[in-house]
Image (cartoon, rainbow, N blue to C red):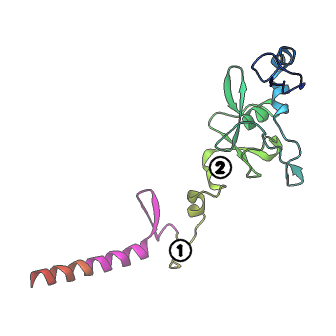
């Protein structure tokens, strides 16, 4: 059984996905034609506008697109093509929370910290906390920064007190 061309369906003499004629037409497309061929314009609605999910290769959930001899993120290509350049030190935040979306209306240029804090990763969830599990406020006076993490000063003091007394009790039992 001979393979058939994926574009026109004609039996293909070559062991390739496309026949010669379709391959020549495929190679002659511009970057924008190739881009829009890989976008699903019927995605779910977000804020009354549709998400346009990338329907081709993904890396970590983001669309991957080959242009000018290198891979670029599809959402960055869309934004830079239709809105403008992304300033140095800034990045795009998907307001719709869909990494595969290439709709530039769903993106906002922000600094890295804002992008992280808007997410749902543990760092964003911890940064949003205003009180420790015991109910003490995590404000400037009651917060320790220890190992890059915020800790409640009141709870830490109580933990240290219990540990100190446990060590003294253990030492007194060993001395007997």
Mark 2, secondary structure of its residue = helix
Instruction: Give residue 69's quadrant in the image.
Output: top right
- Percent from the top left, x then y, of residue 25? 86, 17
Mark 1, secondary structure of its residue = loop
- Depth order, front residue of 27/159: 27
Residue under the image location 88 percent in, 50 percent down: 49
C-alpha gap between disc 1 and disc 2: 25 Å
- Percent from the top left, x then y, of residue 46? 84, 54
| Circle number at residue 115 | 2
- Depth order, front residue of 34/126: 34
- Work out whether 18 lies above or below 104: above
Q: Quadrant of the N terminus?
A: top right
- Work out whether 135 lies above or below 113: below
Depth check, mark 1 against mark 2: the one in front is 2
Q: Is residue 132 left or right of residue 173?
A: right
Q: Mark 1 or mark 2: which comes first in sequence?
A: 2
Q: Quadrant of the C terminus?
A: bottom left
- Depth order, front residue of 28/78: 28
Per the image, is 144 magenta?
A: yes
Q: Residues within 10 Å of mark 1 (few under 14, many from 20)?
A: some
Q: Residues within 10 Å of mark 2 (few under 14, many from 20)?
A: some
Residue under the image location 67 percent in, 55 percent down: 118
Q: Which residue is mark 1?
A: 137
Residue under the image location 81 percent in, 34 percent down: 38
Q: Is residue 143 left or right of residue 131?
A: left
Residue under the image location 58 percent in, 67 percent down: 129
- Are the residues at dot 1 and dot 2 in contact (C-beta closer than 8 Å)? no
- Percent from the top left, x then y, of residue 70? 66, 24
Q: Residue furthest front?
A: 1
Instruction: Give residue 165's quadrant in the image.
Output: bottom left
Q: Is residue 147 left or right of residue 132?
A: left
Residue numbers of the magenta segment: 139-165
């Amino acid at each position: 059984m001979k393979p058939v061309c994926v574009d026109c369906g004609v039996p293909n003499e070559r062991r390739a996905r496309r026949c010669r004629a379709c391959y020549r037409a495929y190679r002659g497309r511009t970057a924008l034609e190739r881009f829009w061929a890989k976008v699903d314009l019927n995605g779910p609605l977000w804020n009354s506008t549709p998400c346009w999910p990338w329907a081709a290769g993904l890396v970590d959930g983001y669309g991957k697109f080959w242009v000018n001899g290198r891979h670029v993120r599809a959402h960055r290509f869309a934004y830079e093509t239709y809105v403008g350049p992304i300033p140095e030190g800034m990045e795009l935040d998907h307001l719709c929370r869909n990494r595969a979306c290439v709709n530039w209306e769903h993106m906002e240029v922000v600094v890295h910290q804002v992008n992280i804090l808007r997410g749902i990763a543990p760092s964003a969830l911890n940064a949003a906390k205003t009180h420790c599990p015991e109910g003490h406020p995590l404000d400037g006076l009651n917060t320790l920064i220890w190992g890059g993490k915020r800790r409640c000063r009141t709870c830490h003091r109580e933990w240290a007190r219990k540990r100190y007394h446990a060590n003294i009790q253990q030492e007194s039992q060993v001395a007997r």
